[in-house]
Image (tube, grey):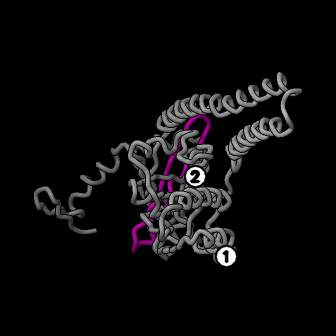
Amino acid sequence: MGFMETAADNHVVNFCTEPCIFTDVLRNIDTGLIILDTIDKKVFFKNNHAVKILSVLDDNPDYDDLCLMLCSDLESLKKPGRTKSRQTIIRHEHRVLGYTVYRLPDDDRYISVFIQDITDRHRLAAMDEAAEMMNNISCLFSGIRHEIGNPLNSIKMAITVLQNNINKYSPEETDVYFTRISGEITKMETLLKSFKNFSMFEVPKTSDVDLRIFFENLMHLLGADIRSKNVEVNIELSPEAQYARIDSRALQHVVMNLFANAIDAMAEQPLPQLTIRSERRDDTIMLSIIDNGCGMAEDLIRDAFKPFFTTKPHGTGLGLVISKKMLAQMNCGIEMSSRKGHGTTFIISMPHGELNLQRGSS
């Protein structure tokens, strides 16, 4: 400890003679703060809000209890360069607590824990999610009525015509109607297959995945098809953004869908290029998938993640909706930017992962 110069008035404050100013501020802020002394194995500091929040638990936890509660977070802080844990959620009876653990870069003795009661925030988020779900359900039912209703009407009409003229039509004329019926049934089968994906990966199994190996495996799977369309693929993964904590099956489904969209968009491009880039922002990996295809107008971008919206003649309009749902289940997100005639970029945000030497990085 020593001296601190405040930016407001260049006034020098001596911590040794006036520690109470800062102690009182920390003691009375509305965020719980706990400081653990890992050498003397004691709670060095606990402010009033932390005491209030921890009173939600059955017993007021001591140093050992807190270390047990924080064990996985404390372990993660031992890794080189790591000074902050991810936010951890604790549910106790009807309350929801969230905390994050910090340590100073050059100090292994003191661990700081910032803890808040986020029950109300979670309830509001749940209400917002429920409202969004109702909007999506309403949109889905409207789309289902349209997407299944049209083929059913077409089938019904074709069958009615056949029933009234079965003895008059030649085999060739009859075959035209049967072909139409078969085509409409195929449309409905495709739609129902897409709906099946809504129930896939309901409980994602996330692990630390090496994105370089992930894309190497994916290119082995899709390489022949991509080469047949003369698409140049550039994979530019930053070493700091090589590991993500995701479900590799779900990510593969999402990326394959984005690749398919990109390849379709580049169909008229003489030199189609698909670029995959990654960068790290704090504890988040930003994965960009960029094509130089036809792009989309601004008014179409707003509808891109709506159910049944599609610019493809034979698309279902569910690919991006399903992808967004899968990513949300893994605490990931997806954003899109596009310019008509200049291509499209999708950015997937994912929690940063770590290299696991025991299990490998696949």
Q: Which residue is mark 2?
A: 327
96, 265: nearer the viewer: 265
Q: Is residue 100 above or below residue 241?
A: above
SS assignment at label 1? loop
Q: Is residue 102 magenta?
A: yes
Residue 75 is situated, as x and y percent measured from the top left of the image, at: 57, 67
Residue 302 is situated, as x and y percent measured from the top left of the image, at: 43, 42
187, 95: nearer the viewer: 187
Seen as rendered, the residue at the extreme right is 167
Q: Residues within 10 Å of mark 2 (few under 14, many from 20)?
A: many
203 with respect to 48 (left or right):
right
Q: Quadrant of residue 15?
A: bottom left
User: Which segment did they paint magenta?
Assistant: 83-111
Q: Amino acid at mark 2?
A: Leu
35, 247: nearer the viewer: 247
Front position among marks 2 and 1: 2
Residue 335 is situated, as x and y percent measured from the top left of the image, at: 46, 52
Residue 136 is situated, as x and y percent measured from the top left of the image, at: 56, 34
Residue sitting at x 50%, y 67%: 38
Q: Say whether residue 225 is visible.
A: yes
Q: Say whether residue 290 is visible.
A: no
Q: Is residue 143 magenta?
A: no
Q: Residues within 10 Å of mark 1 (few under 14, many from 20)?
A: few
Q: Is residue 188 above or below residue 16?
A: above
Residue sitting at x 65%, y 62%: 248
Q: Amino acid at mark 1?
A: Gly
Rendered image: mark on residue 360: 1
Quarter of the image that includes the N terminus: bottom left
- CA separation, marks 2 and 1? 23 Å
